[in-house]
Image (cartoon, rainbow, N blue to C red):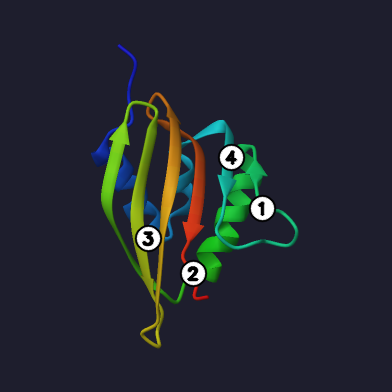
């Protein structure tokens, strides 16, 4: 029987990310994964392949190191999932967004992060 992504497993991924445990975070990704952060890192908006994704996530974790975060409204349906998140900066400013995932088995194939912005 093929393993499937579950809400509990995706929550474990969220906890690994929040704790800054890059090695644990990367265990959730497939080798040919894609990561699209909500902010640009240079000119790149999509990172492909586990090594490149690892570097991008390390940069994102460093960028977000001074915020607290929470994930809620987690949904997993077969090979698709999403969650909503909230970051709170030291000054109390909130940043809201969501992540959209695709899965193969119990691994993340893609993570696309969308952030709300003030207009």
- Spot occupied by residue 8 in the image (x, y as percentages of width and height): 24, 40
Q: Which residue is mark 4?
A: 34
Label 2 environment density (alpha carbons within 10 Å; few <14, some 14–19, many ≥20): some
The label nearer to you, 3 versus 4, is: 4
Residue at x 34% of width, y 55% of height: 84
* Disc 2 to disc 4: CB gap under 8 Å: no
- Spot occupied by residue 5 in the image (x, y as percentages of width and height): 33, 31
Question: Going from the N terminus, do you reach mark 2 or mark 4 first?
Answer: 4
C-alpha separation, residue under disc 4 versus residue under disc 1: 10 Å
* Disc 3 to disc 2: CB gap under 8 Å: no
C-alpha separation, residue under disc 3 versus residue under disc 4: 20 Å
Q: Which residue is mark 3?
A: 18
Q: Which residue is mark 2?
A: 64
* Label 3: element kind: helix
* Disc 1 to disc 3: CB gap under 8 Å: no
The N terminus lies in quadrant? top left
C-alpha separation, residue under disc 1 versus residue under disc 3: 22 Å
The label nearer to you, 4 versus 1, is: 1
């Amino acid at each position: 029987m093929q393993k499937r992504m579950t809400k509990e497993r995706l929550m474990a991924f969220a906890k690994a990310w929040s704790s800054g445990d890059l090695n644990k975070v990367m265990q959730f990704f497939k080798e040919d994964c894609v990561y699209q952060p909500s902010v640009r890192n240079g000119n790149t908006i999509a990172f492909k392949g586990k090594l490149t994704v690892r570097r991008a996530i390390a940069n994102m974790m460093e960028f977000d190191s001074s915020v607290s975060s929470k994930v809620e409204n987690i949904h997993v349906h077969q090979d698709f999932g999403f969650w909503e998140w909230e970051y709170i900066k030291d000054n109390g400013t909130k940043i809201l967004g969501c992540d959209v995932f695709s899965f193969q088995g119990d691994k993340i194939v893609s993570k696309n992060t969308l952030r709300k912005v003030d207009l």
